Image (spheres, rainbow, N blue to C red):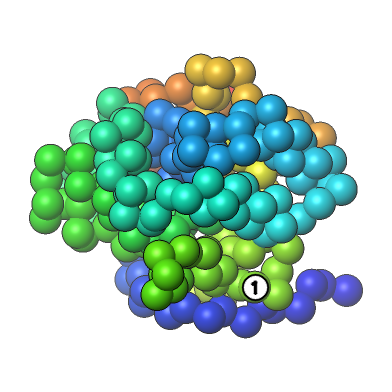
């Protein structure tokens, strides 16, 4: 029996019905060099040790991502940090993958939409995306994420897209509508962590980012579940793989068999 479809509290951008290829990508730790919410929790909230313990409890199935993530953000609010302060901290400290700008430009030039699918909050993503130094390109990227609610007293909380889902944002709901199209595009998905688990098995070609700090929860999940994926370190590496598939030089099966970019 399949899980019930979670009701979304937030709108979705239109599905790209006439494209041959679509890129859907996680934001934190994938497009960025480190997870912005982890960074906030480690520096402004209850710290890395408790945050990491929460991540592992999700990976092991003892807690939902939604509840662990909410607790992380609540620790930041409890320490008196406003959302505007958090956005500024992220804008100054979170960097984009060095290859993402060229990757995004190539996709745009080849009529391949790039859609950010994130368990973070859209306003904080836009704040960091402004570092792309190309306002037009930054604004053209669709973002499917959670939102934020800011209260009169200055406190804030995350507004989950799918509050009834254990993920808070079930990323598979950004992928599955493409599968129902008469002529579905080939879907590339890029991710790195526990929030990407719901999307992992639905991608045609799954890229899993190897992070410099050694944390690789999505790879651990995929290895455990037998989900084929490609390990990459930077989008500059992944671009060559995507180009080989788009040109027809290689099939999805061939690139997945190699397992690394």
Residue occupying image coordinates x 38% and y 60%: 122
Task: Please state the total of marks drawn on the protein image.
Answer: 1
Residue occupying image coordinates x 39% and y 54%: 82
Residue occupying image coordinates x 50% and y 43%: 37
Mark 1 surroundings: few (<14), some (14-19) or many (≥20) residues within 10 A: some
Q: Is residue 43 visible?
A: yes
SS at mark 1?
A: loop
Q: Is residue 23 visible?
A: no
Q: Is residue 260 above or below residue 114?
A: above
Q: Of 208 and 126, which appears nearest the observer? A: 126
111 vs 117, left or right, is left
198 vs 108, left or right, is right
Mark 1 lies on residue: 163
194 vs 175, left or right, is right
Q: Of 161 and 176, which appears nearest the observer? A: 161
Q: Position of residue 167 (x, y in %)?
A: 67, 60
Q: Is residue 220 above or below residue 68?
A: above
Q: Position of residue 24 (x, y in %)?
A: 44, 53
Q: Of 217 and 168, which appears nearest the observer? A: 168
Q: Is residue 52 above or below residue 153?
A: above
Q: Is residue 129 above or below residue 156?
A: above
Query: Which quadrant does the N terminus fall into?
Result: bottom right
Q: Position of residue 208 (x, y in %)?
A: 56, 34
Q: Position of residue 142 (x, y in %)?
A: 32, 62
Residue occupying image coordinates x 47% and y 78%: 10
Q: Quadrant of residue 113?
A: bottom left
């Amino acid at each position: 029996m399949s899980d019930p479809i979670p009701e979304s509290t937030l709108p979705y951008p239109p599905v790209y019905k006439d494209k041959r290829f679509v890129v859907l990508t996680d934001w934190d730790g994938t497009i960025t060099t480190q997870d912005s919410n982890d960074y906030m929790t480690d520096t402004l909230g209850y710290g890395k040790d408790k945050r990491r313990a929460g991540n592992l409890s999700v990976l092991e199935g003892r807690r939902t991502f939604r509840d662990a993530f909410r607790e992380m953000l609540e620790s930041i609010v409890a320490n008196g940090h406003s959302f505007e302060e958090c956005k500024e901290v992220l804008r100054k400290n979170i960097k984009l993958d060095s290859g993402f700008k060229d990757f995004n430009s190539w996709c745009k030039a080849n009529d391949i939409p790039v859609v950010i699918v994130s368990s973070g909050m859209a306003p904080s993503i836009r704040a960091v995306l402004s570092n792309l130094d190309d306002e037009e390109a930054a604004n053209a990227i669709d973002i499917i994420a959670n939102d934020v609610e800011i209260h009169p007293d200055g406190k804030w909380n995350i507004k989950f897209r799918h509050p009834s889902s254990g993920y808070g944002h079930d990323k598979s709901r950004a992928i599955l509508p493409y599968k129902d199209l008469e002529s579905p595009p080939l879907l590339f998905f890029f991710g790195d962590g526990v929030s990407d688990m719901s999307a992992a098995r639905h991608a045609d070609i799954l890229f899993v980012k190897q992070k410099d700090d050694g944390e690789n929860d999505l790879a651990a999940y995929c290895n455990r579940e037998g989900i084929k994926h490609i390990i990459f370190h930077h989008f500059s590496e992944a671009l060559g793989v995507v180009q080989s598939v788009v040109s027809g030089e290689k099939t999805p099966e061939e690139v997945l068999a190699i397992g690394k970019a």
